[in-house]
Amino acid sequence: MNDEAVLAARGLKKRYQEGAGMLEVLSGVELTVARGDMAAIIGASGSGKSTLLNLLGGLDTPSDGSVAIGGQALAGLGDRALGRIRNRYLGFVYQFHHLLPEFTALENVAMPLLIRGTHPKQAAERAAPLLEQVGLGQRTTHKPATLSGGERQRVAIARALVTDPALVLADEPTGNLDERTADQVQDLMLELNQRLGTAFLLVTHNHHFASRCHTRHELHDGLLRRAD
């Protein structure tokens, strides 16, 4: 992997068919995320923030432009190869935690390793310390329905980190939480970024959260501009 950039997007465009014409949501986005960075993307509702994050994470294909993760261009890769890159380099946190309700907190955190083919015992041994780090060491056997909203999001953050990714992509990670809980989750993500050196790229409408990040970008009229 490049010693500096964990993600690079060049000339990124996304168009959708709209009636007889085309709607261009992204018009040539340029973005580099450095190793260990804590970067935020802000923008109005409907500006294309989630669309951009999906392209950066290889979950959708751009109309034009390129994305590289860990120096590997995503263009032309099949689903299996994309899956391997996501599993190796990326972690994902969403506004809604997307935990599997039938599994415990420990099992949910271990899931990316199990998908990778790690032995269940080794996966659990890796997942348990991460739950400790996010303050849930005593909740490992609890299922999502028995956890608070903030606790479920902490489990989701631990799950994103379990593969030791170079970059975590977070889409409105505190958008579904009350203000006090959101502040706690923000503090946790900033602490983990500093302590682990994992880069975070988060999409948020929360300007206070964005102001606490190292770098800030604003998405407006399909273009990304530094907002520092």
Image (cartoon, grey):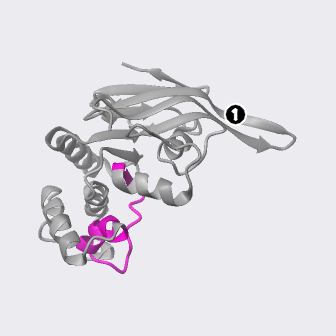
Q: Residue at x 41, y 53 (%)?
A: 86
Magenta span includes 85: no
In the image, residue 216 above or below residue 167: above
Magenta span includes 105: yes
Q: Nearer the viewer, residue 139 or 61?
A: 61
Residue 121 pos. (x, y %) = 19, 77
Residue 156 pos. (x, y %) = 31, 60
In the image, residue 202 above or below residue 132: above
Residue 96 pos. (x, y %) = 42, 59
Q: Residue at x 31, y 62 (%)?
A: 149
Q: Residue at x 19, y 71 (%)?
A: 122
Q: Can the viewer see residue 94 in this picture?
A: no
Left or right, residue 98 beside residue 181? right
Specify few, some or many for label 1: CA neighbours under 10 Å numbering under 14, 14-19, or 20 or more. some
Q: Nearer the viewer, residue 202 or 195?
A: 195
Q: Residue at x 78, y 37 (%)?
A: 22
Give the residues drawn in magenta, as a range.
89-115
In the image, residue 122 above or below residue 63: below
Left or right, residue 161 beside residue 101? left
What is the quadrant of residue 136 in the picture?
bottom left
Amino acid type for the residue under numbered disc 1: Glu
Q: Can the viewer see residue 81 in this picture?
A: yes
What is the quadrant of residue 94 in the picture?
bottom left
Q: Nearer the viewer, residue 33 or 136?
A: 33
Q: Which residue is mark 1?
A: 24
Q: Nearer the viewer, residue 205 or 49?
A: 49
Quadrant showing the C terminus = top left
